Each structure stands twice: as C-alpha cells, then as structure tokens.
C-alpha cells in the first residue's frame, strides 16, 4: 500500500510480528505531493502528523501543497506550505492493522482483528471530515511510537452512497462539468452530472475527490 509512494531504492526494511503488527525503518524520503493525511514527517528537527493536506494551483503562482500539522510532542497544530517538488522525511512508525468499532464523545475505538484487543485513541488524531468517513468494520492502519498512537491511516479509496444530488436533465445545455452532492455521512462532494441519488461511487479519502462508479461483478 505504501511502497508506491516512496522512491525506489529507498531501502525499506520491514518485518512482521504477531497481532498483525508491522515494524518499519525510519528516514524515508517522500515527495510533498505524495504525502497523505496520517503520515508522520520530520521538519526542522520536530516530528509532525499530517492532519490535512490541500493542493493549491493558481495562474500566477506555481502549484504548492498546504499542510496542517500536529506536533507529536506538544500536540499543538501549525501550518506549512511546500512546493510539489519538495521532498520531506517520513518517519516510519510502528504500524498495526486495526478495525474501526465506534466513536464516543472523546475517543475513537479500534479493535485488533486477530486478538480482539480494543484501543481508545483521542478524537483529534483525525480531522472532522476523516472521522465522518469511518464506518463499522473499516480496516485502518494505526501508527504508534513507544506504544503511543500518533496517527491513523484510512484506506486510500472508499466506496460511498450518494444521498442527494441535483437531477441531470437530458438535452440540458451548458451542463456543468461537476455538480454538488451529499454522501451518506453528510459530507459534501463534487460528482459528474450523470451521477444520481442512491448510486455507489468511489472517492479518495484524502480530499473526497470523485474517482468513479463502484465496480459490480456480474
């Protein structure tokens, strides 16, 4: 899942132990454009978890990546802007495959699918939009350092149901390229004009970008 985001020849060393836990080496270089929400990176001697990522492009300025970061030591949030060609050091934390159970008023509750051990993680480890994407039984990756959770990685793509959207009239002129829609968890996204209510579609978990219709085996 992660190797495609890392430069070839980076020397990733991985070993597997019980309970589905993956242990990785540190110091992987990643292009800024390939950063994902949940990655832990090192900047200016500090370790940060990527809370939010936004791709910006304007006619007057070169494309850049706007990041919202959380300092792992202090818990304070900050922002940074990187060029798409910049590289940063991704800190490869201990990784463990988990299943999402539910969200309480203060915690996200996960379960190890092999041992059935349950873990409570602070709500602010994910932003509000990411929390709304969570569904019971969803497979996640929990990253930790010295036994303390640092971030949660959602699947890169998710299948969701379109709850409501504007109708597309056949023969309609000046049809917009995309139209607004609301998916089952209340999040608003943009979809092609041919998408209708009740359809199952694929979106990117990182930025809610439409990918395509759900593929159904016949």
Image: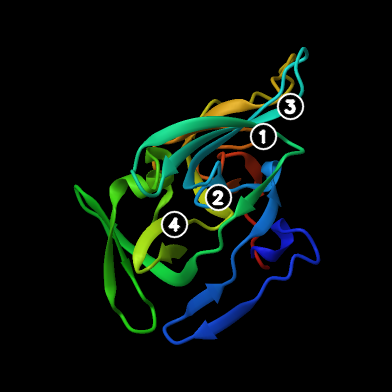
Q: Position of residue 152 (x, y in %)?
A: 44, 57
Numbered disc 2: secondary structure = strand
- Residue drawn at (52%, 76%), measured in percent from left and top? 22
Q: CA distance from mark 4 to mark 3?
A: 27 Å
Marks 3 and 2: CB-CB under 8 Å?
Answer: no
Q: Earlier in the sequence, mark 3 or mark 2?
A: 2
Numbered disc 1: secondary structure = loop
- Residue 48 appears left or right of 217: left
Q: Nearer the viewer, residue 200 or 92?
A: 92
Please identify, in this view, whether the residue under mark 1 or under mark 3 is nearer the observer: 3
Q: Earlier in the sequence, mark 1 or mark 3?
A: 3
Instruction: Read off the residue under disc 1.
Output: 194
In the displayed orientation, state which residue is furthest to the right: 9
Q: Residues within 10 Å of mark 4 (few under 14, many from 20)?
A: many
Q: Earlier in the sequence, mark 4 or mark 1?
A: 4
Please identify, in this view, whether the residue under mark 4 or under mark 2 is nearer the observer: 2
Label ID, residue 41? 2
Is residue 61 shown above or below 98?
above
Q: Residues within 10 Å of mark 2 (few under 14, many from 20)?
A: many
Instruction: Read off the residue under disc 4.
Output: 152
Instruction: Read off the residue under disc 3.
Output: 63
- Residue drawn at (56%, 43%), measured in percent from left and top? 43
Q: Position of residue 12 (x, y in %)?
A: 68, 71
Q: Earlier in the sequence, mark 4 or mark 2?
A: 2
In the displayed orientation, state which residue is furthest to the bottom: 18
Q: Earlier in the sequence, mark 4 or mark 3?
A: 3
Please identify, in this view, whether the residue under mark 4 or under mark 1 is nearer the observer: 4
Q: Residues within 10 Å of mark 3 (few under 14, many from 20)?
A: some
- Quadrant in the picture for the C terminus: bottom right
- Residue drawn at (42%, 42%), measured in percent from left and top? 70
- Residue 8 appears left or right of 143: right
Q: CA distance from mark 4 to mark 2?
A: 14 Å
């Amino acid at each position: 899942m992660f190797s495609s985001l890392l430069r070839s020849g980076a020397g990733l060393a991985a070993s597997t132990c019980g309970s589905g836990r993956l242990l990785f080496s540190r110091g992987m270089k990643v292009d800024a454009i390939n950063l994902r929400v949940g990655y832990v990176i090192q900047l200016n001697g500090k370790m940060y978890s990527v809370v939010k990522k936004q791709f910006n492009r304007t006619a007057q300025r070169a494309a850049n990546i706007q990041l919202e970061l959380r300092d792992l030591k202090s818990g304070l949030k900050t922002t940074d802007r990187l060029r798409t060609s910049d590289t940063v050091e991704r800190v490869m934390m201990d990784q463990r495959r988990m299943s999402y159970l539910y969200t309480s008023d203060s915690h996200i509750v996960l379960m190890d699918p092999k041992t059935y051990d349950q873990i409570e993680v602070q709500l602010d480890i994910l932003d509000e939009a990411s929390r709304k994407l969570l569904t019971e039984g969803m497979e996640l990756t929990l990253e930790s350092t010295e036994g303390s959770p640092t971030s949660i990685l959602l699947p890169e793509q998710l299948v969701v149901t379109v709850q409501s959207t504007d109708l597309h009239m056949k023969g309609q002129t000046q049809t917009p390229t995309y139209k607004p829609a609301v998916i089952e968890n209340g999040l608003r996204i943009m979809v092609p004009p041919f998408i209708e209510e009740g359809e199952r579609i694929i979106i990117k978990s990182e930025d809610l970008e439409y990918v395509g219709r759900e593929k159904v085996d016949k």
